[in-house]
Image (cartoon, helix red, strand yellow):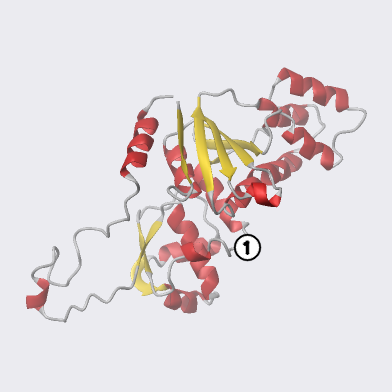
Amino acid sequence: MAITGSLSEFSLPEIFQFLDQGQKTGILTIRDLKALQTGKSLLRHIWLHNGRVVAAGDRLDNRGLARLIEERGWITDTNRAEVERLIQANVPLGLNLKSLGILYPDQLKLLFSVQVLRQVCSLFQVETGQFRFDAKVDLPKAEMTGLSLPATETTLMGLRSLRDWQILQSKLPDTSSTLFKIIYDEPHLRLDASETQVWKLADGSMNLKKMAERLQLPLPKIQQISFRLIVVGLVEEVPDIDMGIADNSDDLKGLDGDISGQLSNPPVRTEISNSFLQSLVGFLQHKA
């Protein structure tokens, strides 16, 4: 079963979140519609197992990971035949090379970071693109280091390593907005120190400007951190809107809440296309 859509309709972090929560196995392919104009690779492939990202690349010949290893000089004339044998056998390349003493754990971590996080990071720069997710495909074991990350955490780590936020600038929360926690339990994702500080302050009591002053961090940095927490589903943005309501109990009787004016219903999110959402829900309910 496959599902397709546009990145303008459904963002990459949202796609990752659904695939993570649905514990899906398959291949996610991103087509960059502007890549043809720049001569860059048109397609990116991300392989998932039970909602965890296990590999990524721009090719389907099972030689992407081997190429990364060779570029770093870790494939020599002595072990080249053994590496080729493992590729042909379609077994987890990284773990097997580690068991043979050809690669070490720190080298596998570096390879996973370059192969997966760098690929994911580049996808946040795609302005116009399409995606397709195919389930029940054979995973390319020769592309696998043996390491993996939940898809949502991959989003978080990919955004942390992002250097150029220009394309995402319009998507950052407004500096006058406040943040509210979606969950109050300790986050299941591993947050860094700054992310943890922002998450703890996400109680609606201060806008991003005041948060930046409180934490003594640049305002753009606070916006970027807030964006990361929003797209992985830990907080949501509430714009600072002047409702024009006077501090008078008679004026508050029409609100669905208590006399203090606190609403009993949470802020309403912008709805996604109904047809797309129905397709996505049907897909995620389909048992792998």
Percent position of residue 27, x then y: 55, 32
**Residue drawn 76% across the image and 41% down it:** 107
In the drawing, does residue 202 fall left or right of residue 171? left
Q: Which residue is mark 1?
A: 164
Image quadrant for the C terminus? top left
Badge 1 amino acid: Asp
Residue 126 pos. (x, y %): 57, 52
Of 141 and 281, which appears nearest the observer?
281
Q: Nearer the viewer, residue 272 or 78?
A: 272
Residue neighbourhood size for the residue with mark 1, other residues' Cα within 10 Å, grouped as few (<14), some (14–19), many (≥20): few
Q: Quadrant of residue 281?
A: top left
As drawn, the residue found furthest toward the front would be: 37
**Image-based side of 184 in relation to 38, left or right:** left
| Picture quadrant of residue 90 | top right
Give the side of residue 78 with respect to residue 11, left or right. Answer: right
In this picture, is 101 found above or below 149? above
Residue at the top extreme? 89
Q: Position of residue 112 (x, y in %)?
A: 68, 41
Disc 1 element:
loop
* Furthest-bottom residue in this view: 247
Residue at (54, 51) in percent of width and height: 128
Confirm whether residue 196 shows in the render: no
Q: x%, y% of residue 198?
A: 46, 65
Image point (60%, 26%), residue name? 139
The reply to whether residue 263 is in sight is yes
Quadrant occupied by the N terminus: top left
Q: What residue is at 64 percent from the left and 38 percent from the top?
A: 56
